[in-house]
Amino acid sequence: MSLLELQSLRKSFGGFAAVDGVSMSVRKGGLYGLIGPNGAGKSTLFALASGLIAQDGGSVRFDGADVSRLKPVDRARRGLVRTFQVPREFKRLSVLENLLVAAPRLSGESLWRVFLQPGTVARDERVARDRAGEILEFLKLGHVRDVAAGSLSGGQKKLLELGRALMLDPKIVLLDEPFAGVNAVLIEDISARLRELKALGITVFVVEHNLPALCELVEELHVMDRGRLIASGEPERVLEIETVRSAYLGGAR
Ligand SMILES: Nc1ncnc2c1ncn2[C@@H]1O[C@H](COP(=O)(O)OP(=O)(O)OP(=O)(O)O)[C@@H](O)[C@H]1O
Ligand SMILES: [Mg+2]
């Protein structure tokens, strides 16, 4: 069953077509990858899917509904969540606090409820703290929960970014280059966590330049070049396709 469906998406910046009519269907509960040379439009596609930027044409369907006109926060509430290519942690806040600020709107944010229902507010905060604690254990970041996020390693920041997404209880996570700047050991760790998310029924869609690590991880690979989708399928087969080799691997040879 299709969870995320992108239909003929288009986005231009100053007359330049960054995403030029991309259609793609992402099934529920799998691990998927998206590759393509620098500037192919991968991050722009994620931005369109998550609602960070508005499409010039086409539509985004998620979990059976058209979400094309919803704001990112409303798409996130439905379970469509992305992470950013460059981690956006609050450097001076602790790791735990970084998760808490990503939590769904707490009832404590409404002043009236603080006065009228202090019990509810305290309970919500406890729930968010418990959840953040569980996510940090899951990501094996429990030992740095009180450390300032700015002092984490590159790989730990990527894990924190994933943790912030998990606070939103996603049905799908779109991960933009989770392995970039991460050492080999931590890449294995991140991959293991992503497999566990899949086992929990969460769909994972990853943009990556690290082809060996990505192909090891995903069951289906999509390839973009110059704003267009040029191939989709099993990783081993897709990487054999001549247009993919010349578009993507050609640059790397
Ligand atoms: N906000 C923007 N304003 C102007 N041009 C943009 C903007 N965002 C992206 N672009 C351009 O659109 C094209 C696609 O960019 P995008 O970031 O989606 O590529 P990418 O496939 O993610 O590349 P990379 O692998 O380097 O991250 C690029 O030429 C980029 O310069
Ligand atoms: Mg990008």
Image (cartoon, helix red, strand yellow):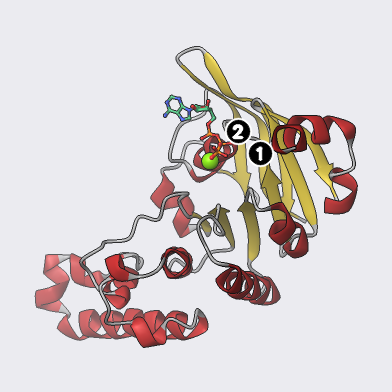
Looking at the picture, tell me which residue is in the foreground, 92 or 137: 92
Residue 151 percent across, percent down from the top left: 29, 69
Can you see residue 179?
Answer: yes
The residue where tag 1 is placed is: 6
Quadrant for the C terminus, please: top right
Q: Name the residue at 55% across, 52% down.
A: 177
Q: Quadrant of the N terminus?
A: bottom right
Residue 45: which numbered mark, if any?
none
Residue 68: x and y in percent read 53, 37
Residue at numbered disc 2: 59
Q: Residue at x 47, y 67 (%)?
A: 155
Q: Amino acid at mark 1?
A: Leu
What amino acid is found at the position of numbered circle 2 in the picture?
A: Ser
- Between 248 and 93, the one nearer to me in the picture: 248
Q: Is residue 202 left or right of residue 181?
A: right
From the viewer's perspective, is residue 52 above or below residue 135? above
Q: Is residue 23 visible?
A: no
The residue under the point 57% across, 31% down is: 39
- Label 1 environment density (alpha carbons within 10 Å; few <14, some 14–19, many ≥20): many
Binning the other alpha carbons within 10 Å of mark 2 as few (below 14), some (14 to 19) or many (20 upward) gives many
Q: Quadrant of residue 17?
A: top right
- The secondary element bearing badge 1 is classed as strand
The numbered mark, 1 or 2, whose residue comes first in the sequence reads 1
- Which image quarter: residue 10? top right
Proximity of marks 1 and 2: CB atoms separated by less than 8 Å: yes
From the viewer's perspective, is residue 148 above or below residue 13?
Answer: below
* Residue placed most toward the observer, 7 or 22: 22
Is 224 left or right of 70, judged from the image as shown?
Answer: right
